Amino acid sequence: MFNALTGLNQKVGNFPGVTVDKKTGMSELAPGQPVNIIDLPGTYSLYPKRADEWVTYKVLLGQDPAVQADMVVLLVDASNLKRNLLFCSQIIDLKIPVVVALTMMDLAKQKGIVIDVDGLERELGIPVVSVNPRKNKGIPQLKKIIELRARQLRQAPARDFISNNVLAAGAVQDVKKLFPDKEISDYTAIHYLINHESFDFRQPLQEKIENIEIAHAFNHTRIQADEIMQRYARIRQIMQHTVAEPDPLQRTLFTEKLDRLFLHRRWGYVILLGVLLLLFQSVFWLAQFPMDAIDWTFSRLGGLLGHFLPEAWWSNLLVNGVLAGLSGILVFVPQIMILFGLITILEDTGYMARISFLTDKLMRKVGLNGKSVMPMISGFACAVPAIMSTRNIENRKERLLTILITPLMSCSARLPVYTILIALVIPRKELFGFFSLQGLVMMGLYMLGLVMAMMVSYVAKSFIKLKEKSFFILELPMYRAPRWNNVVVTMINKAKIFVVDAGRVIIVISLILWGLSSFGPGDRMKQVTARYEESLRKNPDQAAALDKERQAGLLENSYAGLLGKTIEPVIRPLGYDWKIGIALITSFAAREVFVGTMATLYSVEGGKDADPQTLHQRMSSARRADGTPVYTLASGVSLMIFYVLAMQCMSTLAVVRRETRSWKIPVIQLVYMTGLAYLMSFIAYQLLK
C-alpha cells in the first residue's frame, strides 16, 4: 500500500515484522496537492508490548515530536475482519480522522466471506474503501477520500465506538481538565492515565496525573479488560449486520493443506534443509558465468590500459587503484542479486514465516523463541536492519540475546569473501553428479554461523538475569504467488546498495591503500630501486624475474607493507601472511573490502607491465618467502572461519549501541566475536595444515 501510494520501492514482505520503524514518502492526491505519507509498524491494539508497537503508539497518541499525523489510513484484513476491527475501534475513539482501506478481499472471497462494505461504513461512522495494492485497484478512490478529508469535507468520527467515559468517569474528566489548551478525547485521557510515565510530559503534569490515579483508585488491568470486552461485544454486533461467514469446518483452504506438509514435525525440517541447500547451490550455479565474464573483462581492460597508458603515477593509480577496486565490487553483483532474489521469493510466498514456527522449539532451548528467527534470517542480508527488527520481540532477555548473536549470521558483505576463498581452495567438482562441492561449503559456512549463534545464546542466557515469561504468537500469512516485480526490484536495489554504499567504501579504501602501497618512509623505496638497477646491469637477461622481485620489494617496504609485517607475528599461527593482515584491518570498515584490498595489493605488486590476470589467478599464484603457496586448504578454511565469526563492522556496533542504549553489549560483541574467530581459526589451521 505504501509503495502504491508513494511510488517508492520500500522493503515489503509477506510476514509480520518487516516494518519496525517509520518510513516516509510523498504522494500527490491531486495536481498541486502533495501529502506526506508515513508508514508505521503494524499492531493489533493500542496496548503496545514490543518496541516497534511503541513507535506506532506514540504517533497515534501525539507523543512523537517528529510526526503529528493529520489523518490515519488503516489497513484492515478483510479475511480476518473481527480481529482487525479492535484496533480500528480504538483509533476511532482517539478522534483522529481515519479511513479504512479494506485489503485481502480476494482472500475473503476464497474463504466464502461476504462483506457489506457500505453497511460496514455506516456502522463504523468512517469511510471504508476496498483496495488491492498488489494490482493497484482502489488506489484512486482511496486518494479521493483522503483529498476530501484534506478539504475538511470529512471530519473525525462524531460518535464514540464505546462509552469510554463510563470506564473511569471521574479520572477521565480530571485528566481532560489538565489540557485546557487542546481538546483530548475520553479514550486519549485513559491512555494518558495508563502510560503517562512513557510520555514526554513535564514533571508537574506527571505528578498531577499520578495523583488522579491514586485519588480515583484507577486500575489499569481492570479498565483495559472492561474496554476490550465492550469493544468485542460491539464488533460482534457489527459483524452480524454486515458480514456473512461460512461454517469454518466446511472448507479447508489450500494454505492449510500446504501447512500440514511444511509444518510437519519431521518432513517440515527435511523440506527446510532442502530449501536451504537449493538456495546456496543456485547461487553458484547461476552466478558462475556472469562472474567469470566480469572478472575476465576487468583483467583484460587492466592489461590494455597498462600497455597503452604512459608510465606515470596517475596511470598507476587508475589501473591499480580505481580499476582494481571496481573489479572487486562488480564481480560479486550477480551472486548478491541471485541470493536476494531467491530470499525475496521465500518471503513473498509466505514460507519464511513458517521457518519461525519450525524452529521455535529449538530456539527456546537456547534462550530464544521463534520470533528470533526473523532477525537472524534478516541478518543474512545485513545485521543493521536485522538488529532493528528485534523490536518485535516483547521479552527483553530474548531481545538482548537475539541482538547479541545476530552479527554471527553471514551477511551479504561476507559473500564476496566466501566466494573468492572457496574458488581458491575448494575444487570445482560435483558430488553424486549433482551437488556442487563449492555450494555445499558455502552452505556449511552459513550453517556454522547459525550453530555458533545457538551455542553463544545457550551460554549467554545464564548471564542475563531477567525473568520474563514469553509466548510465541505469530500470524501465519497466506501462501501466495511471488510478486515478480517485487523480486526484480529487490534484486536491483540490493545490487545498487552494494555497488553504491559498499562500493563507495571499497573505492575510498582502495585508493588509500594504493597510496600506502606505493609510497614508503624515508629512502626505503629508492634503495629497493637502486638494488634492482644494479642487479639488472649484472643480469640483463633476467629482467622479467628481477622486475617481479622489485615490485615485491617495493610493496614490502611501503607503509602498507610495514604495517602488515608488524602484525604478521600475531596472525601467523592462523596461516595468514602480512597481506591478509592488512585485509583484516581494512575489513573493519566493511567486510567486503577484503576483496578490494587483495585486488589492490596484488595489482600493485604485479606492476604496470605484468601479464593481465584475474584476481583469482594472482591469489592462486601467491607464494610465501619459502616458496609455499599462501592460499592452501588450511589457510583458506581458517580465513573463511575467521570471517564467519569476527565482528568486523563498525555500523553494526553503532546500531547495537543505539538499540540497547549502552556500550556494554557492543563491547561484549566485539570482544567475544573477535576472540572466538581467532580461536576457531587457529584450531582449523592447526588441524588442516
Image: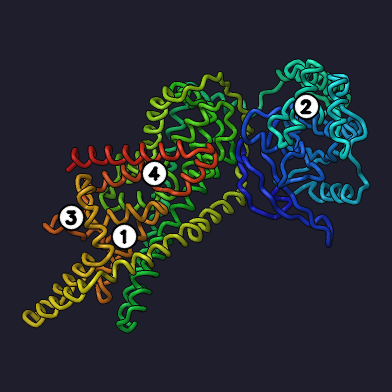
Circle number at residue 598: 1
Identify the amino acid type marked 3: Pro
Q: Residues within 10 Å of mark 2 (few under 14, many from 20)?
A: many
Which of label 1 and label 4 is nearer to you? Answer: 4
Give the residue at mark 4. 647
Q: Nearer the viewer, residue 249 or 190?
A: 190
Q: Which of marks 2 and 4 is nearer the N terminus?
A: 2
Mark 3 lies on residue: 629
Mark 1 or mark 4: which comes first in sequence? Answer: 1
Residue type, label 1 = Met
Q: In this view, does 608 lie above or below 273?
A: below
Question: Label 2 belongs to which residue?
Answer: 209
Dot placed on the residue nearer the N-terminal end, 2 or 1: 2
Mark 3 → mark 1, Cα distance in angstroms: 15 Å
In the rendered structure, find residue 627 and report the number of the disc placed on it.
Answer: none
How far, Cα to Cα, is label 2 from label 1? 63 Å
Q: Is residue 178 left or right of residue 338?
A: right
Q: Residue at left 21%, top 60%? A: 621
